[in-house]
Amino acid sequence: MKQIAVVILNWNGVQLLEQFLPSIIAYSPEATIYVADNASTDASIAFVTANYPEIKIIINKNNYGFAQGYNEALQNVEEEIYALVNSDIEVTQNWLQPILETFNSESSTAIIQPKILDYKNKAFFEYAGAAGGYIDKYGYPYCRGRLFDTVEEDLGQYDDHATIFWASGACFFIRKNIYRELKGFDSSFFAHQEEIDLCWRANNKGYIIKYNYLSKVYHVGGATLQQGNAKKTYLNFRNSLLMLTKNVPKGKLFFILFFRMILDGIAGLQFLFKGKVAHFTAILKAHFDFYALVSNAYKKRDNFQMQKYYRAKSIVYTYYIKGGKVFVK
């Protein structure tokens, strides 16, 4: 058995598989490759079977989304390391070797993210992950190389092996035993921010999450759910509140949630003033659905929550008030 499994979650993505599987096949001799299919109704499985018989196929019974989709599929994957790779990722030569070297030499490292660049503009970092992620005190995620909608050009400024708070689900490496210890992603999230929640839970247990710039991939981004989509807005706002409920230290939780809801309300009003009624409605729905789920989310809290989970107090203040558009090391 090979040490690493590359697992690509797919739902009606035959065109993406046609475009991006060739690079994975060409540059992943160290890995067993799987396509985990979320009950697609297109020709995805027929395409893979006909063109790549060496790829192992896992068929989920329903479209479970990202979180439960991977949870279901990975029950059948026994390689020591999981590489969870979006179907819109182009990998590069030797992309797996630096990852394997880090896992083999650093027993305390549980999760790794490669450098993620923009497939459409390869000189720039990509929105979903860039050079590794952090969150602020109120749960807003940001990256080395991306603050809100401002994405940096890759000038080598993040060519390092940094310890980060979260790794992007677009290309996410994790030890199998850690994934199973953490019971995988929280399936109630469906999609968006489930990888941040899992990383937060890993941090709570003292595991280390790394960024490795020697591994490089290119991500289309938004191929399955476009940026600016109201459903994406809904999932991000709802899941962020669920994540805070599960992971913020108990003594700080009420204040953090209360203040975050105020910030969400301001964001909703901005959408409304800009005529983006669907996004305003999405935030309202996110909050109402959060109220229905908050009790169950609270029951999922670990016995220990790290006290200093944030690097910046408020990235909203830094970005919108102070005008700080670039990550500061």
Image: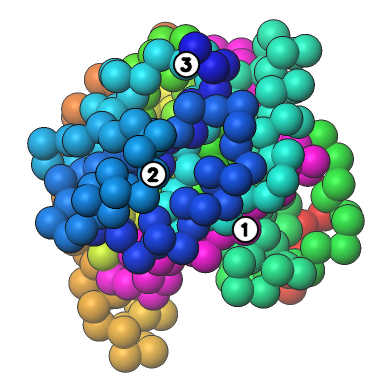
The residue beneath circle 2 is 52
Q: CA distance from mark 3 to mark 1?
A: 24 Å
Counting from the top left corner in percent of width and height, residue 235 is at 30, 55
Image position of 215 (left or right of 67): right
- Badge 2 crowding class, 10 Å Cα cut-off, few under 14, some 14 to 19, many 20 or more, is few
- Badge 1 crowding class, 10 Å Cα cut-off, few under 14, some 14 to 19, many 20 or more, is many
Q: CA distance from mark 3 to mark 2?
A: 20 Å
- Badge 3 crowding class, 10 Å Cα cut-off, few under 14, some 14 to 19, many 20 or more, is some
Q: Is residue 205 magenta?
A: yes
Image position of 123 (left or right of 230): right
Q: Is residue 60 magenta?
A: no
Helix, strand or loop status at disc 3:
loop
Helix, strand or loop status at disc 1:
strand
Q: Residue at 68% of width from left, 50% of height from top?
A: 92
The tag on residue 218 is 1
Q: Residue at 32% of width from left, 90% of height from top?
A: 275
- Residue type pointed to by label 2: Tyr
Task: Please report contact status of discs 1 and 2: CB closer than 8 Å, yes or no.
Answer: no
Nearer the camera: disc 1 or disc 2: 2
Res. 292 image quadrant: top left
Q: Is residue 75 visible?
A: yes
**Between 130 and 286, which is closer to the camera in this rendering?**
130
Counting from the top left corner in percent of width and height, residue 298 is at 28, 26
The residue beneath circle 3 is 79
Q: Tell me which segment is drawn in magenta.
A: 204-230
